[in-house]
Image (cartoon, coloured by chain):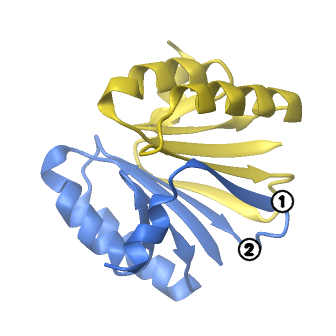
Chain colours: A blue, B yellow
Amino acid sequence: MFVILYYDVNKKRVSKMLKTCRKYLTWVQNSVFEGEISISNLERLKIELENIIKDEDSVVIYTFKQMFYSKREVLGKDKKEETKFI
Amino acid sequence: MFVILYYDVNKKRVSKMLKTCRKYLTWVQNSVFEGEISISNLERLKIELENIIKDEDSVVIYTFKQMFYSKREVLGKDKKEETKFI
């Protein structure tokens, strides 16, 4: 299953969110992650994120059973690629 | 067609990007937009964004012909809703 995840959280929690999401998904830019993930890992990730965030924070998770009807296009630089070589 | 769009641009260009994307899509959080859009409007939006961004900037556009295989989930607050009442 493919996932696009983005969050908008209080500055104090950003690094914890980044570290947690990076265990499961690929950082794309700012507070946006993408990637293939199993259902069980997605459940694990959600539990970990729920333990971090407070009511004021927001995490949006789009899950796609298949990406057949979709297209990914980039204007300018694709920062996602860069993260593969870190 | 449904679109998820996010950008990572130099601070100097953020407000112009925000203003341009807001004409076509709904602001969700940070530099993320979502929404239904026609093919012609998406082409217009892309041209306008290409006139704004520089090489160092990045805009990722996911287009979905249909969202049948997808799910949108929110942990915490759904900031997208707030924008409807502005």
Residue highlighted by disc 2: A65
Task: State which quarter of the image contains the N terminus of chain A.
Answer: bottom right
Residue under the point 60% across and 43% down: B5
Left or right of residue B70, residue A34 in this image: left
Residue type pointed to by label 1: Phe
Residue under the point 76% across and 44% down: B2
Is A12 rendered above or below residue A21?
A: above
Residue highlighted by disc 1: B68
Secondary structure of the residue carrying numbered label 2? loop
- Can you see residue A33? no
Left or right of residue B21, residue A65 in this image: right
Residue type pointed to by label 2: Lys
**Quarter location, residue B51:** top right
**Where is residue A33 drawn, in percent x and y?**
45, 63
Left or right of residue A30, residue B46 in this image: right
Is B42 rendered above or below residue A72?
A: above
Q: As rendered, which of A24 and B46 lies closer to the eye?
A: B46
Is B68 rendered above or below residue A24?
A: above
